[in-house]
Amino acid sequence: MPYLMGCLCWLQLLSPAITEYPLPNAASYPTAIASGPDGNVWFTESFGNRIGRITPDGVIQEFALPTLNSVPNAIVTGPDANLWFTEYYGNNIAVISPSGAITEFPVPTTGSLPFGIAVGPDQNLWFTESGANKLGSIMVNGALAEYGLSADRKPTGIVAGADGALWFAESLIDAAGVQRIGRMSTDGTVQEFAIPTPAAFPFNLTRSADGNVWFSEYYGNSIAVISPSGAITEFRVPTNASQPAAIVPGPDGRLWFSEASGDKIGAVAPDGGMSEVALPAGAHPTGLAIGPDGQVWLAEPNRNAIARLMVRP
């Protein structure tokens, strides 16, 4: 209990240290965010149809996408030191260089709705196809392969596990109200693990330093951890109906996550102890990343802004 109280006080002291950077264009709806290889932070603008870049001191530059109304979604730094992202309605996987050059690669399956993306253990980019019930893999040269799931699961978030496999969230609720976390080896073999809370809606995943996979439960209002063997433990978020969305490992050994409806940023210790930081009203934080500066950066779609939370001196 003393540890949790200490975390809470520390975060409360930091809560005023939030800086917002409004986007140049209205209604851009920034969604996902990633630490870039160039010392900047990069983000997707789902309604603006652009990729944005923000420097540590808040200077923003935007790059328009070739495909109209593509709805860029998840973004990650690739093994080639470029930024890779999904185009949900554009049905593409795309890459942008630090200088702003964009290349798009069409997903072979029509209407695949590519959603999450992660660097795999094989140094390819792996992504979920929420509309096609598949996982995809793309090499940095654009060669693309797809792997079907055994049943309709509507995969969303994805991360590479410490076990050399891809772990992903399955958003479809079956007749019993069950949703699952899936595990796919790089040869396409799939295992599934039922989430204890019905209709929890697993959303985004990340890997912690101890080799476990953590994930957010958007409607379950919990942060959960799954071991390599498939054992799941859930930790309830203190704010009701907070809709936890993005989750990333922090520099302090905790997992940091966004609360889309709670207008807060949360942190959870490996033992489940939680604390929260209040954001400006209506922030609706979605994407979250630890920037190259070691601070927490987040996308605020409803305020049309990128924000930085100072968590380190």
Image: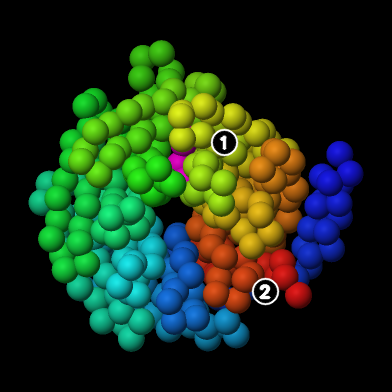
The answer to which quarter of the image holds residue 197 is: top right
Task: Tell me if mark 2 has few (under 14), some (14-19) or many (20+) residues whose alpha carbon lies within 10 angstroms of its own.
Answer: some
Residue 234 position, x and y percent, is 60, 31
Lower sequence index among marks 2 and 1: 2
- The answer, for residue 11, to whether it is visible in the render is yes
Q: Write the residue at 14% across / 56% down.
A: 144
Q: Which residues are magenta?
A: 201-205
Query: Mark 1: which amino acid?
Result: Ala
The answer to which quarter of the image holds residue 167 is: top left
Kindly state the secondary structure of the residue where label 2 is placed: strand
**Image quadrant containing the N terminus:** top right
Task: Tell me if mark 1 has few (under 14), some (14-19) or many (20+) residues whose alpha carbon lies within 10 angstroms of its own.
Answer: many
Numbered marks: total: 2
Q: Write the residue at 47% across / 64% down.
A: 33
Question: Which residue is disc 2 drawn over?
Answer: 19
Residue 281 position, x and y percent, is 68, 58
Nearest to the observer: residue 215 or residue 81? 81
Is 5 drawn above or below residue 197 in the view shown? below
Q: Write the residue at 41% across / 32% down.
A: 181
- The answer, for residue 282, to whether it is visible in the render is no
Nearest to the observer: residue 160 or residue 96? 160
Nearest to the observer: residue 151 or residue 2? 2
In screen coordinates, is 283 left or right of 151? right
The label number, if any, that marks residue 224 in the structure image: 1
* Label 2 – label 1 distance at C-alpha: 29 Å
Residue 99 position, x and y percent, is 33, 86
Q: Is residue 227 magenta?
A: no
Is 272 drawn above or below residue 267 in the view shown? above
Is 222 drawn above or below residue 29 in the view shown? above
